[in-house]
Amino acid sequence: MPDPGMFFALLVDPEDAVPGPVRLELTPGTSPAAAAAALAAVFHADPDLERVEVAVGGKPLGVARRERLVGTRPDPDSREFGGGDHSTLPGPARRFTLLRFECRVCDLAVLRVHADWQPPSCPDHGPMELTR
């Protein structure tokens, strides 16, 4: 069976090693397809966002770029992941809601698709606040 990490590598840009302005944290066991759907939802929710740092189980995987991913254009009528085989409906993912945590002091933001563990912490300023 192929290593799931190999599929996650398709989502991130190997040339972009600088952390993004926003980090998407996924739980261990998240499938690459669910990660791709979460990234599509992130880019769909914020049309100005171009880069997102991706971490699974707290381990950074790299930076996903809007231009690298298929189906993440802000136009809700554009194709989404799976749109070629008509397996998904247009628009943001409906399987989950993105939760955004922000540091009260700096610009660090973390996105999660669940809230079943402690809120993330800013390395410099401590616990982050849920903003949406």
Image (spheres, grey):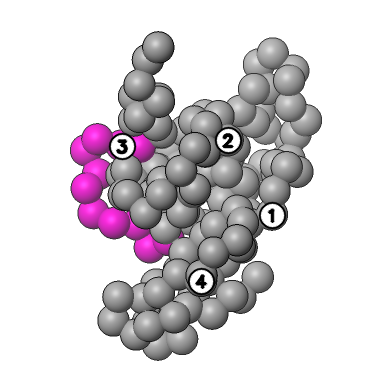
Q: In the rendering, at what x and y percent does residue 102 appear?
A: 49, 75
Q: Earlier in the sequence, mark 1 or mark 3?
A: 3
Q: Is residue 36 visible?
A: no
Q: State the mark number for residue 34.
A: 2
Quadrant where the C terminus lies?
Answer: bottom right
Label 4 sits on a secondary structure element that is: loop
Q: Quadrant of residue 75?
A: top right
> Magenta: predominant secondary structure element?
loop
Classify mark 1: helix, strand or loop: loop
Label 3 and label 4: CA atoms lie apart by: 27 Å
Instruction: Work out whether mark 2 precedes mark 3 in sequence or the reverse, and give the earlier one.
Output: 3
Question: Is residue 75 among what the camera can see?
Answer: yes
Which circle's residue, 4 or 1, is located before the other in the chain?
Answer: 1
Give the amino acid type for the residue marked by disc 1 in the picture.
Answer: Thr
Q: In which image quadrant can residue 114 be found?
A: bottom right
Q: Which mark is residue 13?
A: 3
Mark closer to the chain start, 1 or 2: 2
10 Å crowding of disc 4: few (<14), some (14-19), many (20+): some
Residue for badge 1 = 97
Q: Position of residue 36 (x, y in %)?
A: 53, 35
| Magenta segment | 12-22
In the drawing, what numbered circle is on residue 44?
none
Q: Residue at x 46, y 54 (%)?
A: 25
Mark 4 — residue? 119
